[in-house]
Amino acid sequence: MSAPTPVPNNVLSDRLREFSARFRGELLRPGNDAYEAARVVWNGMIDRRPACIARCRSVDDVKSAIRFARDNDLSIAIRGGGHNAAGLAVSDGGMVIDLRGMRDVVVDASARTARAGGGATWGELDAATALHGLATTGGVVSTTGVGGLTLGGGLGWLMRSYGLACDNLIGAEVVTADGQVLHASASENPDLFWALRGGGGNFGVVTTLEFRLHPVANVLGGILFYPLARAREVLRFYRDFVRSAPDALTVFAALLHSPDGHPVCGLAICYNGPIEEGERAIKPIRDFEAPIAGAVGPMPYTAVQTMLDAGFPSGLQVHWRSEFLAAVPDDLIDAMVSAYERVPSPLSAILVEQFGGAVHRVPAASTAFDNRDSDFNLVIVSRWADPAAAERNVIWARSTSDAARPFTTGRVYVNYIGVGEAPDRVRAAFGPEKFSRLVQVKRQYDPHNVFRMNQNIPPG
């Protein structure tokens, strides 16, 4: 297929004016404050200027936006409610389909299900489900978008109890590249449903997601901080402790700077169950040694979902790396701590996220998400404020990732692929068999790769 002929700017301008008059949502174009605010994304590295931003309020708005973009050879970027660390929610010279006007959450407490609009955040979904003593797995930062996190897999505090966010997805409404509105579930368009659970935003605009909910009220949660000089001992203790941790307990380890600016090693904890049982489960942590700061105690699940929010503000320059781990050997611990001792920015962090439990028990072939046999995910979050410092901070992230690679499985988490990473990183998220199946689904629902502003799976 030959490349489309670009529409001349003057013609496109006239067409946009006509489209804006009939578009029921809000169409933003360059030249006003609303456009400037709407094009800004969470990652401050991204500074792109789309031709227009279609703020959709309904499925019909989404259909109209797709049709206009295709008729005028505009690339399409899809913006949900959250972070999109790779910055793919906005493109230069194209159309952004912005779903943040579609963020309603409807809970059916008797059926233990919830329906969320494609622009909702986990904070909004959690607030609605908590009114009924219910929740589902949904990240660890409340400002994360429901759609983006779920479509890429969706780890969270509850995953060892109930599986990933995508494992709790029971249905989705999708607008495809040709304007069809499809429902995907185990019984309707099951091939699309399989691909949506881990394959990212490759197959259409997901306007509604429906989740299975679970009884969740108070949890035992919090963060404990130890001096960075003790990090090797803390990480070795962490590795050995979580080997026998019950499924109700999820613990992440981190190398970071404390709120008052000191380099530390942290353990972030969530026990999803009776508080007394949780105290017994974390007793080895309390007995290990006294932390220099932090606390763990009973709190609402919505509070544990927000306890990391302050560490993930919008506007910083961000470069992420991710590597799945089968184990955390001493040599990897030494490599991580040595790297963090040389970190150029106090805003950066290295995290080890614990998997296992229910994540392992979901059959590997049942979803596009891969890596269920990994026990940990290593996350390198390089962040800095001054754009002039980009080179040394990106180099630090990449060198830290390279130093860890001998200890990794060779697989990555698609939601943690950073800005400008090579296409083979997308393949590394799935493995050859699942990637091949995803290509087939892409070929069926988006044969011309209309939805390519994502961690892209080309149709062939």
Image: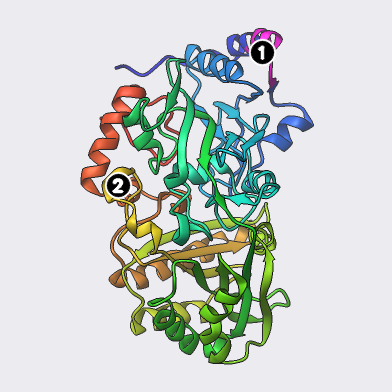
Q: Position of residue 143 (x, y in %)?
A: 65, 50
* N-term-proximal mark, 2 vs 1: 1
Q: Position of residue 364 (x, y in %)?
A: 28, 50
Q: Position of residue 328 (x, y in %)?
A: 36, 76
> Along the horizontal axis of the image, is 262 left or right of 200?
right
The number of numbered discs placed on residues in the rendered structure image is: 2
Image: 204 above or below 271? above
Most distant residue in the left direction: 433
- Decide whether the magenta segment is chiefly helix, strand or loop: helix
Image: 302 above or below 453? below
Amino acid carrying mark 2 in the image: Arg
Residue denoted by label 2: 427
Q: Position of residue 263 (x, y in %)?
A: 61, 81
Quadrant of image for the N terminus = top left
> Along the horizontal axis of the image, is 204 left or right of 445?
right
Badge 2 local density, few (<14 within 10 Å), some, or many (20+)?
A: some
Residue 275 among those drawn in magenta: no
Q: Secondary structure at mark 1?
A: loop
- Numbered badge on residue 348: none
The span from disc 2 to disc 1 (Cα, nearest Å) is 38 Å
Badge 1 local density, few (<14 within 10 Å), some, or many (20+)?
A: some
Quadrant of image for the C terminus = top left
**Is residue 43 at least partly visible in the picture?**
no
> Along the horizontal axis of the image, is 60 left or right of 204?
right
Residue denoted by label 1: 23
Residue 20 among those drawn in magenta: yes
Range drawn in magenta: 16-26
Image: 263 above or below 16? below
Amino acid carrying mark 1 in the image: Phe
Q: Is 23 or 433 nearer to us in this picture?
A: 433
